Amino acid sequence: MLRFHRNEQIPYMRQEQRKKQIAILGSTGSIGTQALQVIAEHPDRFEARILTANNRWELLAQQARQFKPAAVVIANEDHYPTLRQALSDLPIAVYAGADALCQVVESAEVDMVLTAMVGFAGLPPTIAAIRAGKPIALANKETMVVAGELINGLCREHGVPILPVDSEHSAIFQSLMGEVSPIDKIILTASGGPFRTFTREQLADVTPAMALRHPNWDMGAKITIDSASMMNKGFEVIEAKWLFNVEPERIQVVVHPQSVVHSAVQFADGAVKAQLGVPDMRVPIQLAFSFPERLQSSFERLDWFSMHDLTFERPDTERFRCLALAYEALHQGGNAPCIVNAANEIVNRAFLEERCAFLEMPAIIERTLQQTSFIKQPTYEDYLATDAEARRIAASLLSPQ
Ligand code: NAD
Ligand code: MG
């Protein structure tokens, strides 16, 4: 005879109230640490199930102690013994290596994967997560830049949603909530970075230290340099094309130094919807986690009476060639954006290490785009090969030290 005990209701109840189990790829970075702040603010809603880092094993161990994930992964295997030792008193599985990143995201317990790693390295684990049917909170824009078409196809095949974390794309996503009509135009705002008003002569001499001082956002080093060169905005145009299925002609970059309007969408009737707020990445991160709900937050509110002027300017693609190169790569299609991304990773690092001048960056990216084999309809393997080839070419174009 079937009997229902009171206790047997509990699994069902738990199902209803189950905390979302989040895997954070890149938990020690700028986005990763802010994601953990969001999780700490909502312990009733979210749990960090998996945390991963590349090198910063001490911070990873500290995060693991605080958030008690089921597993951690350190991508750089050299740190594995130390990390394992540091967590030996806790029931936390410790793994190492790039392949482990792809395996942990497939875990049945994971409900959402936040891709907060930097660069092309984010592509394989994102694909593994999509194949395992995990919703993606996408911070790693390079994934969409390199392989947007492939990612979209996989998402369709596996019924996986992508929730944008990039502030502009979250703003566009929010402006589209409740809309059924097509987008007429995307207004993608850009702060313009620290060199917005610099002449070409001044740009020739800028240093990494100057580039790392972003006026509005505190971010990881790579994206901060990309913001200074406006490659970041170029990548965001490509990201927007794939996330919202709009042609580049319908994406207008608008320089808005105050970073209050995070982006906007114009519709067929001329109406424009925008999302505004203080620059705080925890807002889009939290929304990606809680969508379709909005949760309470303690984050700073917009002070309408301290905003004296919000200004908007046309971007200058002569001084900021990287933005033009991103449009060029989009027009070429195929593996061209993958080439630009790979070359950019090389010159970005070289600039940071003072092995490449600021204005040399777009020049090397452009030459790499011309010299790397073009593939019209790349497969995943083609992307891996293109990435390797373009890195090799870009590195060979750097002036010898
Ligand atoms: P970050 O450098 O601060 O952190 C990167 C994280 O990824 C670290 O945890 C690092 O350990 C890990 N990582 C780096 N390389 C790795 C590798 N090869 N294998 C495994 N793990 C690796 O970077 P960030 O600023 O947090 O940016 C992360 C991503 O989010 C980037 O794609 C960036 O474009 C995007 N993004 C960041 C911001 C921001 O405000 N920081 C805003 C929008 C989008
Ligand atoms: Mg952005």
Image (cartoon, grey):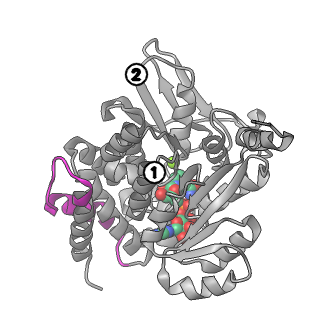
Query: Residue furthest toward the top?
Result: 269
As drawn, the label of residue 132 is 1
User: Which image quarter holds the C terminus?
Assistant: bottom left
Q: Is residue 375 left or right of residue 184?
A: left
Q: Measured along the vertical axis of the image, is residue 147 above or below residue 58?
A: above
Q: In the image, which disc is placed on residue 184?
A: 2
Specify the amino acid type for callout 1.
Ala
Q: What's the CA distance linking mark 2 and mark 1?
A: 34 Å
Relative to 125, residue 388 above or below: below
Query: Residue 83 is drawn in which quadrant?
Result: bottom right
SS for dot 2: loop
Towards the viewer: 106 or 373 = 106
Of tags 2 and 1, the one toward the viewer is 1
Q: Is residue 341 above or below residue 173?
A: below
Image coordinates of residue 363 in percent, x first then y, are: 25, 62
Q: Which quadrant does the N terminus fall into?
A: top right
| Span colored in magenta | 355-381
- Residue at the spot 66% in from the left edge and 40% down from the top edge: 290
Residue 230, can we see it? no
Amino acid beneath label 2:
Asp
Q: Earlier in the sequence, mark 2 or mark 1?
A: 1
Which x, y percent locates residue 179?
52, 19
State if disc 1 and disc 2 touch (CB < 8 Å).
no
Secondary structure of the residue carrying numbered label 1: loop
Res. 393 in view: yes
Looking at the picture, tell me which residue is in the foreground, 24 or 119. Answer: 24
Percent x, y of residue 344: 34, 63
Residue at 25% across / 69% down in the picture? 388
Q: Is residue 31 left or right of residue 88?
A: left
Q: Position of residue 300 (x, y in %)?
A: 77, 45
Q: Which mark is residue 376?
A: none
Confirm whether the magenta stretch covers residue 356: yes
